[in-house]
Amino acid sequence: MQQTNTIVETETQIPLGWRERLSPSKINKIPGRYNLPRMFRKSGHSTKQMREPGPTRSVAALQTSFKITDTFELLRTRRWSVFDVQHVVLAGLCIFSIWIIEPSAPIIKTAAALGYLLLLLMPITRQFFLPSWPIWTYLLYFFSSRFIPYDVRPDIFVKVLPALEDILYGTNFSSTFAKWTNPVLDVFAWFPYGLGHFGLPAICSVIMFIFAAPGTVPMFAKSFGWMSTLGVSIQLFFPCTPPWYERLHGLEPAKYGMQGSPAGLARIDALFGVDMYTTSFTTAPVPFGAFPSLHAADAILEALFISYCFPKLRGLCIFYVCWICWATMYLNHHYAVDLLGGGIIAYSIFFVVKKFWLPRPQPGKTYRWQYEYVEVGEMKKNKALDEELGYGHVGAGKRSIDYANEFTVLDSFMHSGSSSGSSSPTTSVRSDRNNRRTD
């Protein structure tokens, strides 16, 4: 009882000034920029929306909508950039390729063009056919090039590549490797040149889609398509005879309309008793497209992407590149200088894509579905901008990119590359912080 009285007595001796200071009416008000109801009123959001935010879209999610109106809305609100020129160039190449194909068949050509346009407009198909558009353009461009009139084409160079071979290496590697042939070596060379070249791009795409960071496959598809398109353009503007021409015709002038040759692949047809390559190479659209070697360029680009995503496979990638480079010369289809040209083009494209747009692998992530955000490129981070946008040490360098929306991938990479170049679902946080600063 005495102890209780002491407590009461002590409580009554607290200065009244403290009670006034602790009064709710005297407590300092929260600054306006931190007043959540006011902030949401200015940004057009309600308190209910603040308490019940919508679900965050995973960076690994895929589009499932067939609504074309979604694409039109996306185009209406899109931030156009210099990278959108690529779509104009692709459309121009497609129109040119379709236009020169014989017979004219306008109804069929129009139906094919509208069909692909429909695939680009539906979100569920756009996510696959937009990033792979450069590949389809390359294939159309390559196969339609046979219809380019001969009178507008440049002269065919017969002596340039053999001369460069002698200057750079002092010998003709293709002639050296092609002198010694046997069925075992034929089959060994056939695997990478006749099978791997056509099937490996799809296999690499599937592997990277499942096990690499989200957004890797679109970058691979764009790189592969643009590299191949550039290679075909060089072959058309700088036509050069391959080693099999020198072996059959020497250094005699070449003319358009001459048949191509399967060279060493004819032995594969004879070995298996089927016509897999004789007819296709004899009637090839670009028979004098030795430089650059797209067989070497494709293999090197695939090896660079796989080595980047899966460093433990680097040794296997190096072996495959050496294997297919030897096969191209053994089968008498390319000079060594052709391989050098293809390798330079492949590495240059990979270097640029890796520096600005290629998603970076994260330790401990085995599948694409384990990624919560994606770090892009190798651009230096801008700490001041990260702090202004509200990213701390954990969130610094994470940017929001919707990989399911392939229309905005390159544009988003361009805008994020100058700061940190990565992605995380934080778009709403940015908008809120911008509103706070204007308070």
Image (cartoon, rainbow, N blue to C red):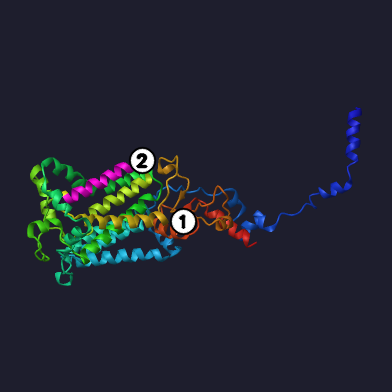
Query: Horizontal placement of 409 versus 38: left or right?
Result: left
Q: Residue furthest bottom?
A: 151
Q: Residues within 10 Å of mark 2 (few under 14, many from 20)?
A: few
Q: Residues within 10 Å of mark 1 (few under 14, many from 20)?
A: some
Locate residue 78, reporting x and y percent: 44, 63
Locate residue 399, reporting x and y percent: 49, 53
Observer able to see residue 29? yes
Looking at the image, do the residues carrying marks 2 and 1 touch, with CB atoms under 8 Å apart? Answer: no
Mark 1 residue element: loop
Dividing the image into 4 quarters, which one contains the C terminus?
A: bottom right
Locate residue 116, reporting x and y percent: 29, 59
The region drawn magenta spans 312-329
Q: Amino acid at mark 2?
A: Lys
Q: Residue furthest front?
A: 170
Query: Horizontal placement of 435 versus 298: left or right?
Result: right
Residue 395 lies in the magenta-colored region: no
Whole-Å distance between the Cαs marked 2 and 1? 25 Å
Image point (59%, 51%), residue name: 50
| Residue receiving disc 2 | 312
Residue 313 lies in the magenta-colored region: yes
Please report whichever mark, 2 or 1, sits nearer to the chain's N-terminal start.
2
Indicate the quadrant where residue 414 lies: bottom left
| Residue receiving disc 1 | 379
Image point (51%, 52%), residue name: 397
Mark 2 residue element: helix
Reply above or below: 113 against 52. below
Locate residue 94, reporting x and y percent: 26, 64
**Number of labelled discs?**
2
